[in-house]
Amino acid sequence: RDRDGAPGTAQQQREGTAAEGGIRTAPSVRLSTEQRTQIRQIFTRGGLADRARIRSVDFNISIGTAVPRTVNLVALPPDIIEVYPAWRGYMFFVVGDEIVVVEPGSLRIVAILPA
């Protein structure tokens, strides 16, 4: 169900995610609308996404998927941590038109944002 109590899409229900503005997050990630907007703006300015871009992956990009250790992960920049401090120490990579935020210990995907 989404934040208003309405059922999400079948994909959202399978992934256990909430999607707003093209952003999908794990249930533990609580981003306000303002935070979502700020994070998207930070990623789109200054070529940040391009620095962490990889050509392709051979695993499913979905919330909760463990990212192989062979994937080159980049630390989230301080600007993102200022907006969402819970992501301190988290990593990310970009593939296709998606920015993928990864929890450092488990290497699990916790957020997927449009690039």
Image: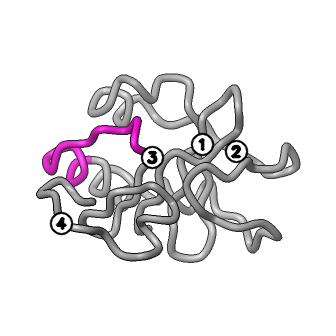
Residue at 46% x, 35% y: name it.
77
Residue 103 in picture, x, y percent from top left: 60, 35
Q: CA distance from mark 3 to mark 1?
A: 11 Å
Residue 73 tag number: 2
Residue at 62% x, 54% y: name it.
93
In the structure shown, which secondary structural element does the residue marked by tag 4 occupy? loop
Q: Which residue is mark 1?
A: 102
Which amino acid, mark 1? Val
Rate crowding at label 3 as few (under 14), some (14 to 19) or many (20 or more) other CA atoms within 10 Å: some
Q: CA distance from mark 1 to mark 4?
A: 28 Å
Between disc 1 and disc 2, whose residue precedes? 2
Residue contact between numbered discs 3 and 1, judged by CB atoms under 8 Å: no
Residue 73 in picture, x, y percent from top left: 70, 44
In the structure shown, which secondary structural element does the residue marked by tag 3 occupy? loop
Q: Nearer the viewer, mark 3 or mark 1?
A: 3
Q: Which residue is mark 3?
A: 26
Residue 107 horizontal side relative to residue 113, left or right? right
Q: Nearer the viewer, mark 4 or mark 3?
A: 4
Q: CA distance from mark 4 to mark 2?
A: 35 Å
Q: Which residues are magenta?
A: 26-38
In the structure shown, which secondary structural element does the residue marked by tag 1 occupy? strand
Rate crowding at label 4 as few (under 14), some (14 to 19) or many (20 or more) other CA atoms within 10 Å: few
Instruction: Tell me: residue 48, above or below residue 22.
Output: above
In the structure shown, which secondary structural element does the residue marked by tag 2 occupy? loop
Q: Which residue is mark 4?
A: 6
Q: Quadrant of residue 54?
A: bottom right
Q: Quadrant of residue 40?
A: bottom left
Residue 6 horizontal side relative to residue 91, left or right? left
Q: CA distance from mark 3 to mark 2?
A: 19 Å
